[in-house]
Image (spheres, rainbow, N blue to C red):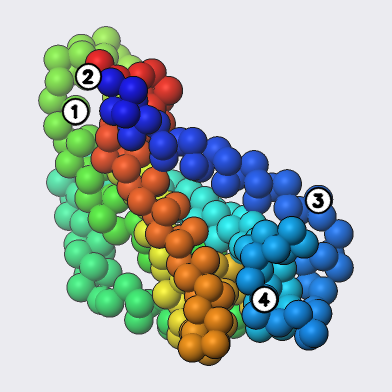
Amino acid sequence: MGAKRYLVRWPIFWLCVLSISCIGSLMLPERLCFAQDLSNRCAGPSLAHLLGTDALGRDMLIRLLRGGFLSLFIGIFSSSMAAAIGLTVGVASGYGGKVMDRTLMGTVDALCALPVTLLTLLFLAFFGKSLWVLCAAIGLTGWFSFARVVRASTMELRHRPFILSAKGLGQSSAAVIVRHILPNLLPTVSAYGLLLLPEAILSEAFLSFLGLGVPMPRSSWGNMMVDGLQFFQRHPMQLLWPTFFLLLTLLALTAMAERNEGPESFLGGVN
């Protein structure tokens, strides 16, 4: 039972430790984050540098935590934007009638037919490369599937007896949506919405490999992996450390989403 309990709770444990550490790294002086020690390049772990240094002599642990904060920030901001758009479109389509449903879902189907990567690249090419443009590009191209899931759940809910009763009592459509539809969509939204977060983080890492990631001098895990590829033969840990942090975070977020409708069950124990 102890081993099973640990396996269930490790994602929330890892994400809590990672989040606290990443936020704590922001309190460190900037000189520690960008300081270069060319005489100590590609060094292994030591008391001064717990995870060693990179090809420019910068502390790997500090860079990983700073990069993790930026990757998580991009993921949270972009996935929140995608969830908000998808929730709005899905509820409007599922509850607004046949005309609105056909219009909105036709638009979604047309957007889904286009490669998401191409849409993101076009957005970045048109608006330029910056942190906020990158977040917007990922968020505005990540809501299509989420809208379909919300639409299907909304259409199933609108025929429930309590919804019909609320409408029969004269409640407006807005009141029915706010008081009855949205609260009952919460399990679906929290479960599927949580899957948007690792997708957004992975999208940023992929765009970094195309040279469209976080602009320098900022560093994300994606940027660190790109830098690590150049020195893989000489110093493989420069690539392996950010890859390990990225994969473990993606696994933790995916495990939370697949386990239940949100992080609450991880705190509630195992039945």
- What amino acid is at disc 1? Arg
The residue singled out by tag 3 in the image is 27
Quadrant of residue 134 in the image? bottom right
Q: Which mark is residue 219?
A: none
Image position, residue 192 (x, y; %): 30, 43
- The reply to whether callout 3 and callout 1 are in contact (CB within 8 Å) is no
In this view of the protein, can residue 191 be seen by the observer?
no
Name the residue tied to disc 1: 158
Task: Say if mark 3 contacts mark 4, CB within 8 Å.
Answer: no
Residue drawn at point x = 72 percent, y = 68 percent: 59
Q: Are marks 2 and 4 in contact (CB under 8 Å)?
A: no
Q: Nearer the viewer, residue 132 or 182?
A: 132
Whether residues under marks 1 and 2 lie with C-beta atoms below 8 angstroms apart, the answer is: yes
Front: mark 2 or 4:
4
Q: Is residue 163 visible?
A: yes
Measured from the top left, where is residue 267 in percent x and y? 42, 23
- Which amino acid type is marked by label 2? Ile
Residue 68 location, x and y as percent?
58, 58
Residue annotated with mark 2? 163
